[in-house]
Image: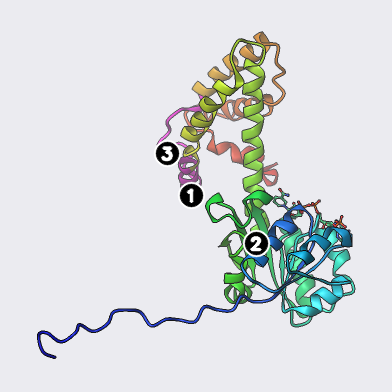
């Protein structure tokens, strides 16, 4: 090559865009409809079924094929996604369907035990199975910027083969071959969220009858909760090491003393402490057991029913 010869092209060889894979969706409730719209918008041929046909009809106008029965919908495609009310409705809907050779992905919220038994049920009928837990509400589905994602667990081969299709409505997080793990991750996060909302409600109740605008107070709540949330990393370190006294920042004895102020303030403000007392009572029990110089993390021992 001479000095003035053209430089070799660095343009990457164009790769063919994969054709969006066809799939079936059972359940076009609020969440199912959002999922369906995301797949349709991305060009996936979609067959839908819903127990109440009128709820699936609007999707026909948007390009979906509406199947007359769940069995027909399952027969239409190898990948079958289910998003129904609960585990019992999944069993009912799929009762007469031939699942052999199908890849069944269950986006219905359930418990870990339900995920495991549904996996065994599906595998006994010749299907591969993934259970899932959706960390989003319908308006977040199909919006890549929303932070929506779905936990998946179960068949790694199924996840590998259909990962791109599953990633269309929301991000994907595969959390292991145990089909119970997706539900467990989902429910653990939802349980933490409930605790947070209980605290938020109590805080609003405290200020409610004062001259403090809730709209002025809300940003303070959000930034305080955001500042405190990383303490979960510290708790995780302590759980991993089994040393609940490791790097303690705010020890239990001090926190229990502070609880008296929280409870007295609730009384002063005429607010029931019923959302606070389950937690403060647990703290007092752990303090009485001699853990005043530790963090609160060790209280998991009190929650563990196998310790009783
Ligand atoms: P909806 O109540 O809007 O829809 C429920 C769906 O289940 C409908 O398609 C309904 O059919 C169907 N269904 C209920 N019982 C049966 C049954 N016995 N046999 C067949 N189909 C049945 O709920 P969503 O769509 O909002 O929720 C679906 C799943 O998604 C749930 O497991 C939910 O926990 C989960 N999820 C929902 C979120 C949300 O914010 N909406 C957030 C995260 C997860 P029909 O129309 O005939 O009643």
Where on the image, by quarter, is ligand 1? Answer: bottom right
Residue occupying image coordinates x 35% and y 79%: 12
Q: Position of residue 149 (x, y in %)?
A: 59, 56
Q: Is residue 40 above or below residue 303?
A: below
Magenta-span inclusion, residue 245: yes
Q: Is mark 3 within 8 Å of ligand 1?
A: no
Q: Earlier in the sequence, mark 3 or mark 2?
A: 2
Q: Position of residue 299 (x, y in %)?
A: 59, 36
Is 124 situated left or right of 273 in this image? Answer: right
Magenta-span inclusion, residue 259: no
Q: Secondary structure at mark 3?
A: loop
- Asked if the residue under mark 1 is in contact with the one under mark 2, i.e. CB atoms within 8 Å, the reply is no
Q: Secondary structure at mark 1?
A: helix
Q: 186 or 291, which lies in front?
A: 186
How is the protein colored in the picture? rainbow
Q: Earlier in the sequence, mark 2 or mark 1?
A: 2
Q: Is residue 174 above or below residue 307?
A: below
Residue at image mark 1: 240
Report the number of discs: 3
Q: Is residue 88 visible?
A: no
Quadrant housing residue 111: bottom right
Q: Residues within 10 Å of mark 3 (few under 14, many from 20)?
A: some
**Image quadrant where one finds the C terminus:** top right
Residue occupying image coordinates x 77% and y 65%: 61
Q: Is residue 138 above or below residue 208?
A: below
Residue at image mark 2: 38
Which residues, given as a range, are shown in magenta?
A: 233-253
Residue occupying image coordinates x 65% and y 8%: 268
Residue at image mark 3: 246
Quadrant housing residue 72: bottom right
């Amino acid at each position: 090559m001479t000095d003035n010869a053209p430089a070799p092209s660095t343009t990457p060889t164009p790769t063919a865009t994969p054709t969006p894979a066809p799939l079936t969706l059972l359940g076009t409730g609020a969440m199912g409809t959002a999922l369906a719209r995301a797949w349709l918008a991305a060009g996936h041929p979609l067959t839908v079924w819903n127990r109440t046909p009128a709820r699936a009809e609007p999707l026909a106008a948007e390009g979906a094929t509406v199947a007359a029965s769940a069995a027909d919908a399952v027969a239409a495609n190898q990948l079958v996604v289910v998003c129904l009310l609960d585990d019992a409705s999944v069993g009912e809907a799929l009762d007469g369907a031939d699942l052999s050779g199908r890849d069944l992905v269950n986006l219905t919220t359930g418990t870990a035990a339900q995920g495991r038994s549904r996996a065994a049920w599906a595998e006994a009928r010749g299907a591969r199975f993934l259970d899932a837990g959706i960390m989003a509400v319908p308006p977040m589905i199909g919006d890549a910027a929303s932070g929506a994602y779905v936990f998946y667990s179960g068949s790694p081969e199924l996840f590998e083969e259909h990962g791109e299709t599953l990633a269309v409505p929301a991000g994907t997080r595969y959390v292991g071959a145990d089909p119970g793990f997706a539900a467990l991750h989902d429910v653990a996060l939802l349980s933490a969220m409930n605790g947070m909302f209980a605290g938020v409600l109590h805080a609003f109740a405290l200020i409610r009858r004062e001259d403090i605008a809730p709209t002025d107070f809300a940003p303070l709540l959000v930034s305080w909760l955001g500042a405190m949330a990383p303490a979960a990393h510290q708790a995780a370190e302590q759980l991993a090491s089994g040393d609940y006294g490791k790097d303690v920042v705010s020890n239990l004895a001090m926190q229990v003393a502070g609880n008296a102020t929280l409870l007295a303030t609730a009384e002063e403000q005429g607010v029931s402490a019923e959302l606070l007392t389950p937690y403060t009572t647990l703290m007092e029990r752990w303090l009485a057991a001699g853990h005043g110089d530790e963090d609160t993390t060790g209280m998991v021992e009190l929650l563990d029913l196998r310790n009783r």
